[in-house]
Amino acid sequence: MDLVSGIVVYVMLWWLTLFTVLPVGVRREDSVEQGNDPGAPKNPMLLRKLLATTVIAAIVWVVVDQVVRSDLISFREMIREE
């Protein structure tokens, strides 16, 4: 996988992981003030979630990169067989 492909795959994995991690640990506000959304989280912990997203996406990216480099799944071979 070249540099540009690696960056594109990492960015896609990062966003997918972010949307997976965002709902984790969300608690609603107990007493909602007038004008506030009742579904807004009390403490969203965004920095912690962004750091977790970055680490998880990096680990998944390394696995994907190793699978592509090892030709464990070769898309070129799949195309030739058809």
Image (cartoon, rainbow, N blue to C red):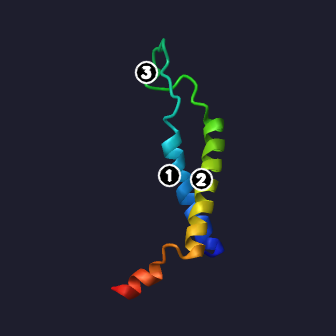
**What separation in Å lies between label 2 and label 1 (alpha carbons)?**
9 Å
- Upstream in the sequence, badge 2 or badge 3? 3
- Upstream in the sequence, badge 2 or badge 1? 1
Tag 3, which secondary structure? loop
**Which residue lies most toward the bottom here?**
80
**What separation in Å lies between label 2 and label 3 (alpha carbons)?**
31 Å
In the rendered image, which quarter is residue 77 located in? bottom left
Q: Tell me which amino acid carries mark 3.
A: Pro
Q: Tell me which amino acid carries mark 2.
A: Ala
Q: Is residue 13 above or below residue 3?
A: above
How many numbered marks have been drawn onto this rendered protein structure?
3
Tag 2, which secondary structure? helix
**38 with respect to 7 (left or right):** left
Q: Which residue position is annotated with label 3?
A: 38
Which numbered dot is residue 57? 2
Q: Position of residue 28 (x, y in %)?
A: 48, 21
Q: Position of residue 40 (x, y in %)?
A: 48, 26
Tag 1, which secondary structure? helix
Residue beneath the point at 54% across and 56% down: 13
Residue beneath the point at 65% across and 36% down: 48
Q: Which residue position is annotated with label 1?
A: 16
Q: Tell me which amino acid carries mark 1.
A: Leu
Instruction: From the viewer's side, name the closer residue of 58 and 7.
Output: 58
Asked whether the residues under the numbered discs 2 and 1 touch, taking CB atoms below 8 Å apart as contact, a structural biologist would say yes
Q: Is residue 70 above or below residue 39?
A: below
Kindly report which numbered mark, 2 or 1, lies closer to the viewer in this rendering: 2
